Protein backbone atom coordinates (compact mmCIF):
# COMPACT_ATOMS: atom_id res chain seq x y z
CA UNK A 1 0.00 0.00 0.00
CA UNK A 2 1.37 3.41 -0.97
CA UNK A 3 2.02 5.63 2.04
CA UNK A 4 2.05 9.40 2.20
CA UNK A 5 4.31 9.69 5.23
CA UNK A 6 6.38 12.25 7.03
CA UNK A 7 8.89 13.33 4.44
CA UNK A 8 6.35 13.10 1.64
CA UNK A 9 4.02 15.26 3.72
CA UNK A 10 6.74 17.88 3.86
CA UNK A 11 7.47 17.94 0.13
CA UNK A 12 3.93 17.05 -0.89
CA UNK A 13 2.56 13.71 -1.96
CA UNK A 14 2.26 14.96 -5.51
CA UNK A 15 6.05 15.14 -5.56
CA UNK A 16 7.93 16.82 -8.38
CA UNK A 17 9.73 13.49 -8.58
CA UNK A 18 6.63 11.51 -9.53
CA UNK A 19 7.96 11.16 -13.08
CA UNK A 20 11.42 10.15 -11.86
CA UNK A 21 11.14 6.65 -10.36
CA UNK A 22 14.69 6.67 -8.97
CA UNK A 23 14.24 9.94 -7.10
CA UNK A 24 10.71 9.04 -6.00
CA UNK A 25 12.22 5.95 -4.38
CA UNK A 26 14.60 8.20 -2.44
CA UNK A 27 11.67 10.27 -1.14
CA UNK A 28 9.77 7.16 -0.07
CA UNK A 29 12.88 5.58 1.43
CA UNK A 30 13.63 8.57 3.65
CA UNK A 31 9.98 8.82 4.71
CA UNK A 32 9.78 5.19 5.75
CA UNK A 33 13.15 5.18 7.50
CA UNK A 34 12.00 8.24 9.44
CA UNK A 35 8.67 6.64 10.31
CA UNK A 36 10.44 3.51 11.56
CA UNK A 37 12.57 5.58 13.92
CA UNK A 38 9.59 7.55 15.25
CA UNK A 39 7.45 4.45 15.68
CA UNK A 40 10.02 2.03 17.07
CA UNK A 41 12.41 4.07 19.21
CA UNK A 42 11.79 5.70 22.59
CA UNK A 43 12.12 9.46 23.18
CA UNK A 44 15.76 10.44 23.58
CA UNK A 45 16.94 7.19 21.98
CA UNK A 46 16.12 7.79 18.32
CA UNK A 47 19.04 6.42 16.34
CA UNK A 48 20.49 6.97 12.88
CA UNK A 49 17.06 7.29 11.24
CA UNK A 50 16.38 10.66 12.85
CA UNK A 51 18.28 12.89 10.34
CA UNK A 52 16.20 11.26 7.60
CA UNK A 53 13.12 13.02 8.99
CA UNK A 54 14.37 16.47 8.01
CA UNK A 55 12.72 17.95 4.89
CA UNK A 56 16.17 18.59 3.38
CA UNK A 57 17.42 15.07 4.12
CA UNK A 58 18.27 14.13 0.50
CA UNK A 59 20.48 17.20 0.16
CA UNK A 60 21.95 17.04 3.67
CA UNK A 61 22.85 13.37 3.32
CA UNK A 62 23.91 13.43 -0.32
CA UNK A 63 27.43 12.33 0.60
CA UNK A 64 26.07 9.22 2.34
CA UNK A 65 23.34 8.44 -0.20
CA UNK A 66 24.87 9.13 -3.61
CA UNK A 67 22.79 8.72 -6.75
CA UNK A 68 25.15 7.59 -9.53
CA UNK A 69 22.65 8.04 -12.35
CA UNK A 70 25.42 8.63 -14.88
CA UNK A 71 27.33 5.43 -14.15
CA UNK A 72 26.99 3.21 -17.23
CA UNK A 73 27.71 0.13 -15.10
CA UNK A 74 24.59 0.61 -12.98
CA UNK A 75 20.90 0.66 -13.88
CA UNK A 76 17.82 1.56 -11.88
CA UNK A 77 16.04 -1.59 -10.75
CA UNK A 78 12.31 -0.88 -10.19
CA UNK A 79 11.70 -4.38 -8.81
CA UNK A 80 14.49 -4.02 -6.22
CA UNK A 81 13.20 -0.59 -5.24
CA UNK A 82 9.67 -1.95 -4.84
CA UNK A 83 10.90 -4.84 -2.68
CA UNK A 84 12.85 -2.43 -0.50
CA UNK A 85 9.83 -0.19 0.06
CA UNK A 86 7.70 -3.24 0.95
CA UNK A 87 10.34 -4.43 3.46
CA UNK A 88 10.48 -1.00 5.09
CA UNK A 89 6.68 -0.82 5.37
CA UNK A 90 6.61 -4.26 7.01
CA UNK A 91 9.40 -3.25 9.39
CA UNK A 92 7.31 -0.38 10.73
CA UNK A 93 4.70 -2.88 11.87
CA UNK A 94 7.15 -5.25 13.60
CA UNK A 95 9.90 -2.80 14.67
CA UNK A 96 12.48 -5.29 13.38
CA UNK A 97 14.95 -3.18 11.37
CA UNK A 98 15.90 -3.82 7.76
CA UNK A 99 18.74 -2.12 5.93
CA UNK A 100 17.75 -2.18 2.29
CA UNK A 101 18.56 0.88 0.23
CA UNK A 102 18.82 -0.74 -3.19
CA UNK A 103 17.44 1.06 -6.19
CA UNK A 104 20.28 0.37 -8.60
CA UNK A 105 21.71 -2.93 -9.70
CA UNK A 106 25.20 -3.54 -10.99
CA UNK A 107 25.95 -5.07 -14.37
CA UNK A 108 29.56 -6.22 -13.90
CA UNK A 109 29.88 -10.00 -13.69
CA UNK A 110 32.35 -11.99 -11.56
CA UNK A 111 35.91 -11.16 -12.62
CA UNK A 112 34.97 -7.90 -14.31
CA UNK A 113 36.69 -4.60 -13.48
CA UNK A 114 34.94 -2.33 -10.97
CA UNK A 115 35.43 0.78 -8.89
CA UNK A 116 32.84 0.21 -6.15
CA UNK A 117 30.51 -2.54 -4.97
CA UNK A 118 27.29 -1.22 -6.46
CA UNK A 119 28.65 -1.82 -9.97
CA UNK A 120 28.80 -5.59 -9.35
CA UNK A 121 25.91 -7.98 -9.90
CA UNK A 122 23.96 -9.23 -6.88
CA UNK A 123 25.89 -11.50 -4.54
CA UNK A 124 29.28 -10.03 -5.43
CA UNK A 125 31.48 -7.18 -4.23
CA UNK A 126 34.33 -5.09 -5.64
CA UNK A 127 37.77 -6.00 -4.32
CA UNK A 128 38.94 -2.40 -4.57
CA UNK A 129 39.93 -1.09 -1.15
CA UNK A 130 38.16 2.01 0.15
CA UNK A 131 41.12 4.31 -0.64
CA UNK A 132 41.89 2.89 -4.10
CA UNK A 133 40.24 3.80 -7.38
CA UNK A 134 41.27 1.16 -9.91
CA UNK A 135 42.21 -2.48 -10.16
CA UNK A 136 39.16 -3.93 -8.40
CA UNK A 137 37.33 -7.01 -9.61
CA UNK A 138 33.85 -8.28 -8.83
CA UNK A 139 34.09 -11.40 -6.66
CA UNK A 140 31.45 -13.56 -4.91
CA UNK A 141 30.62 -12.61 -1.32
CA UNK A 142 31.68 -15.10 1.35
CA UNK A 143 29.50 -17.27 3.56
CA UNK A 144 29.26 -17.04 7.36
CA UNK A 145 32.44 -18.43 8.92
CA UNK A 146 34.70 -17.44 6.04
CA UNK A 147 37.76 -15.27 6.62
CA UNK A 148 37.30 -11.56 5.88
CA UNK A 149 38.92 -8.18 6.36
CA UNK A 150 35.93 -5.91 5.74
CA UNK A 151 32.17 -6.27 5.77
CA UNK A 152 31.57 -5.98 2.00
CA UNK A 153 33.22 -9.35 1.51
CA UNK A 154 30.48 -11.12 3.47
CA UNK A 155 27.05 -12.20 2.27
CA UNK A 156 25.78 -11.35 5.76
CA UNK A 157 27.19 -7.83 5.47
CA UNK A 158 29.12 -8.24 8.74
CA UNK A 159 32.79 -8.99 9.32
CA UNK A 160 33.80 -9.42 12.96
CA UNK A 161 37.20 -10.53 14.29
CA UNK A 162 38.33 -11.51 10.80
CA UNK A 163 35.35 -13.75 10.11
CA UNK A 164 32.05 -13.33 8.26
CA UNK A 165 29.40 -13.29 10.94
CA UNK A 166 25.69 -12.72 11.51
CA UNK A 167 23.69 -12.13 14.72
CA UNK A 168 22.84 -15.41 16.42
CA UNK A 169 19.55 -17.13 15.70
CA UNK A 170 17.51 -19.10 18.26
CA UNK A 171 19.79 -21.39 20.29
CA UNK A 172 23.06 -19.95 18.99
CA UNK A 173 25.93 -19.18 21.36
CA UNK A 174 26.19 -15.50 22.25
CA UNK A 175 28.05 -12.96 24.37
CA UNK A 176 28.33 -9.19 24.67
CA UNK A 177 30.40 -9.23 21.47
CA UNK A 178 28.40 -11.92 19.67
CA UNK A 179 24.90 -10.62 20.03
CA UNK A 180 21.57 -12.17 18.99
CA UNK A 181 19.20 -11.42 16.13
CA UNK A 182 16.26 -9.08 16.66
CA UNK A 183 13.60 -10.55 18.95
CA UNK A 184 16.13 -12.72 20.81
CA UNK A 185 18.14 -12.06 23.98
CA UNK A 186 21.43 -13.50 25.18
CA UNK A 187 20.59 -15.51 28.29
CA UNK A 188 23.25 -17.71 29.93
CA UNK A 189 25.28 -17.67 26.73
CA UNK A 190 22.46 -18.74 24.42
CA UNK A 191 20.07 -16.81 22.17
CA UNK A 192 16.57 -17.20 23.62
CA UNK A 193 13.18 -15.63 22.81
CA UNK A 194 12.62 -12.30 24.51
CA UNK A 195 9.69 -11.95 26.90
CA UNK A 196 8.43 -9.20 29.15
CA UNK A 197 11.34 -8.15 31.36
CA UNK A 198 14.08 -9.34 28.98
CA UNK A 199 17.15 -7.13 28.51
CA UNK A 200 16.94 -4.88 25.44
CA UNK A 201 18.58 -1.99 23.66
CA UNK A 202 15.74 -0.93 21.38
CA UNK A 203 12.14 -1.97 20.68
CA UNK A 204 13.44 -4.32 17.96
CA UNK A 205 14.92 -6.50 20.71
CA UNK A 206 11.50 -7.06 22.28
CA UNK A 207 8.44 -9.11 21.25
CA UNK A 208 5.94 -7.44 18.95
CA UNK A 209 3.91 -4.86 20.86
CA UNK A 210 6.54 -4.23 23.53
CA UNK A 211 9.05 -1.43 23.87
CA UNK A 212 12.36 -1.03 25.68
CA UNK A 213 11.99 0.94 28.91
CA UNK A 214 14.48 3.31 30.55
CA UNK A 215 15.98 0.39 32.50
CA UNK A 216 16.70 -1.55 29.33
CA UNK A 217 13.91 -4.09 29.83
CA UNK A 218 11.06 -5.12 27.52
CA UNK A 219 7.74 -3.72 28.68
CA UNK A 220 4.27 -3.76 27.08
CA UNK A 221 2.62 -0.55 25.98
CA UNK A 222 5.74 1.54 25.41
CA UNK A 223 5.54 1.87 21.65
CA UNK A 224 4.04 5.32 21.62
CA UNK A 225 5.04 6.94 18.35
CA UNK A 226 7.33 9.95 18.60
CA UNK A 227 6.33 13.23 17.00
CA UNK A 228 7.14 13.77 13.33
CA UNK A 229 7.75 16.95 11.31
CA UNK A 230 5.20 19.68 12.09
CA UNK A 231 3.28 17.40 14.45
CA UNK A 232 2.28 18.24 18.01
CA UNK A 233 5.05 17.63 20.52
CA UNK A 234 6.28 18.01 24.06
CA UNK A 235 9.94 18.58 24.96
CA UNK A 236 12.05 15.54 24.12
CA UNK A 237 9.63 13.91 21.67
CA UNK A 238 10.99 15.37 18.42
CA UNK A 239 13.74 13.72 16.35
CA UNK A 240 17.16 15.31 16.04
CA UNK A 241 17.43 18.36 13.72
CA UNK A 242 14.02 19.45 15.07
CA UNK A 243 12.95 21.69 17.93
CA UNK A 244 9.65 21.57 19.79
CA UNK A 245 8.49 25.17 19.34
CA UNK A 246 5.01 26.33 20.26
CA UNK A 247 4.00 22.69 20.64
CA UNK A 248 5.07 21.69 17.13
CA UNK A 249 8.12 19.79 15.83
CA UNK A 250 9.87 22.41 13.72
CA UNK A 251 12.85 21.49 11.50
CA UNK A 252 16.11 23.34 12.04
CA UNK A 253 16.67 25.78 9.17
CA UNK A 254 19.12 25.24 6.32
CA UNK A 255 21.20 27.76 4.37
CA UNK A 256 19.27 30.95 3.61
CA UNK A 257 16.38 30.21 5.98
CA UNK A 258 15.48 32.23 9.07
CA UNK A 259 17.11 31.16 12.33
CA UNK A 260 16.95 32.11 16.00
CA UNK A 261 18.77 31.19 19.19
CA UNK A 262 16.31 28.36 19.79
CA UNK A 263 16.08 27.32 16.14
CA UNK A 264 19.72 26.74 15.22
CA UNK A 265 21.04 26.03 11.75
CA UNK A 266 21.56 22.52 10.45
CA UNK A 267 24.74 23.77 8.82
CA UNK A 268 26.60 27.06 9.09
CA UNK A 269 26.01 29.91 11.52
CA UNK A 270 23.06 32.16 12.27
CA UNK A 271 24.09 35.56 10.90
CA UNK A 272 21.64 38.47 10.83
CA UNK A 273 18.79 36.03 11.38
CA UNK A 274 19.70 33.79 8.42
CA UNK A 275 21.65 30.55 8.19
CA UNK A 276 24.93 31.27 6.44
CA UNK A 277 27.74 28.89 5.60
CA UNK A 278 31.15 30.07 6.81
CA UNK A 279 33.62 30.98 4.07
CA UNK A 280 37.23 29.81 4.00
CA UNK A 281 39.17 31.51 6.79
CA UNK A 282 36.18 31.96 9.06
CA UNK A 283 35.94 30.35 12.49
CA UNK A 284 34.20 27.00 12.86
CA UNK A 285 33.36 24.38 15.46
CA UNK A 286 32.82 21.54 12.99
CA UNK A 287 32.92 20.79 9.27
CA UNK A 288 29.16 21.41 9.10
CA UNK A 289 29.78 25.11 9.71
CA UNK A 290 31.87 25.51 6.57
CA UNK A 291 30.85 25.98 2.95
CA UNK A 292 33.80 23.74 2.10
CA UNK A 293 32.72 21.11 4.65
CA UNK A 294 36.29 21.21 5.99
CA UNK A 295 37.20 22.65 9.42
CA UNK A 296 40.82 22.49 10.59
CA UNK A 297 42.15 24.21 13.70
CA UNK A 298 38.79 25.98 14.22
CA UNK A 299 39.08 27.62 10.79
CA UNK A 300 37.21 26.81 7.60
CA UNK A 301 39.76 25.78 5.00
CA UNK A 302 39.38 25.03 1.30
CA UNK A 303 39.35 21.52 0.00
CA UNK A 304 42.63 20.24 -1.37
CA UNK A 305 43.23 20.59 -5.12
CA UNK A 306 44.31 17.70 -7.33
CA UNK A 307 47.82 16.59 -6.46
CA UNK A 308 47.67 18.07 -2.96
CA UNK A 309 48.28 16.14 0.25
CA UNK A 310 45.27 14.73 2.07
CA UNK A 311 44.28 12.40 4.89
CA UNK A 312 40.72 11.49 3.90
CA UNK A 313 38.41 11.70 0.89
CA UNK A 314 36.50 14.69 2.24
CA UNK A 315 39.71 16.76 2.27
CA UNK A 316 39.71 16.78 -1.54
CA UNK A 317 37.74 18.87 -4.01
CA UNK A 318 34.49 17.43 -5.29
CA UNK A 319 35.13 14.82 -7.97
CA UNK A 320 38.34 13.52 -6.44
CA UNK A 321 39.46 11.18 -3.68
CA UNK A 322 42.39 10.78 -1.31
CA UNK A 323 44.53 8.00 -2.80
CA UNK A 324 47.89 7.32 -1.19
CA UNK A 325 47.65 10.63 0.73
CA UNK A 326 47.23 12.57 -2.53
CA UNK A 327 44.01 13.98 -4.05
CA UNK A 328 43.42 12.29 -7.37
CA UNK A 329 40.65 12.59 -9.93
CA UNK A 330 37.93 9.95 -9.94
CA UNK A 331 38.37 7.68 -12.93
CA UNK A 332 36.75 4.46 -13.96
CA UNK A 333 38.89 1.33 -13.97
CA UNK A 334 40.06 0.03 -17.31
Image: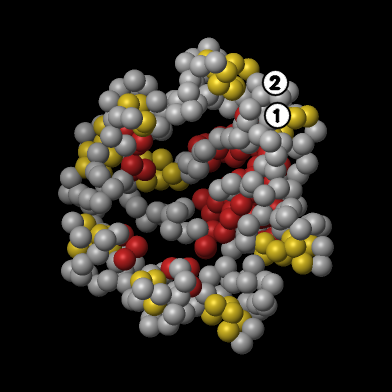
Q: Quadrant of residue 16?
A: bottom right
Q: Is residue 294 visible?
A: yes
Give the colour scheme of this rendering. secondary structure
Determine whether label 2 and label 1 are within 8 Å by CB: yes
List the single residue furthest toward the top.
171
At 57% from the left and 68% from the top, the residue drawn is 266
Q: Is residue 154 above or below residue 42?
A: above
Q: 1 or 95, which lies in front?
A: 95
Q: Earlier in the sequence, mark 2 or mark 1?
A: 2
Q: Residue at x 32, y 72 (%)?
A: 303
Residue 107 visible? The answer is: no
Q: Is residue 128 left or right of residue 210?
A: left
Identify the image quadrant of the N terminus.
top right
Query: In this figure, what is the number of numbered marks?
Result: 2
Residue 25 percent location from the top left of the image:
56, 48
Left or right of 300? Residue 237 is right
Give residue 161's position: percent from left, percent from top. 33, 30
Question: Is residue 33 or residue 9 the one in the foreground?
Answer: 33
User: Which of the 4 image quadrants contains residue 198?
Assistant: top right
Q: Residues within 10 Å of mark 2 (few under 14, many from 20)?
A: some
Residue 277, above or below 323: below
Instruction: State how far apart marks 2 and 1 are (Cα).
Output: 7 Å
Tell me residue 108's x, y (percent).
29, 39
Is disc 1 surrounded by few (<14), some (14 to 19) or many (20+) residues within 10 Å? many
Image vertical order of residue 252 relative to residue 103, above or below? below
Residue drawn at (46%, 53%) of the image: 65
Say which residue label 1 marks. 218
Assign a secondary structure to mark 2.
loop
Circle 1 SS class: strand
Image mark for residue 195: 2
Q: Position of residue 294 (x, y in %)?
A: 38, 70
> Residue drawn 21% across and 57% down?
323
Amino acid sequence: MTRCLLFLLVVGCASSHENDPAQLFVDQYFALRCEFGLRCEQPGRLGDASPLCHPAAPELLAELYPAPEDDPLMVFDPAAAERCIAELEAAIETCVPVHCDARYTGTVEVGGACTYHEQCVDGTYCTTEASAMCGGRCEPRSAIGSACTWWDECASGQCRDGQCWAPGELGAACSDERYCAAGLACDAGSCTPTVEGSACGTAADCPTGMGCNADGRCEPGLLGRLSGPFEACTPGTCPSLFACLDGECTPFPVEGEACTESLRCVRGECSDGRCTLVADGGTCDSRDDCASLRCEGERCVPRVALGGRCERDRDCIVGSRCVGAVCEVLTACD
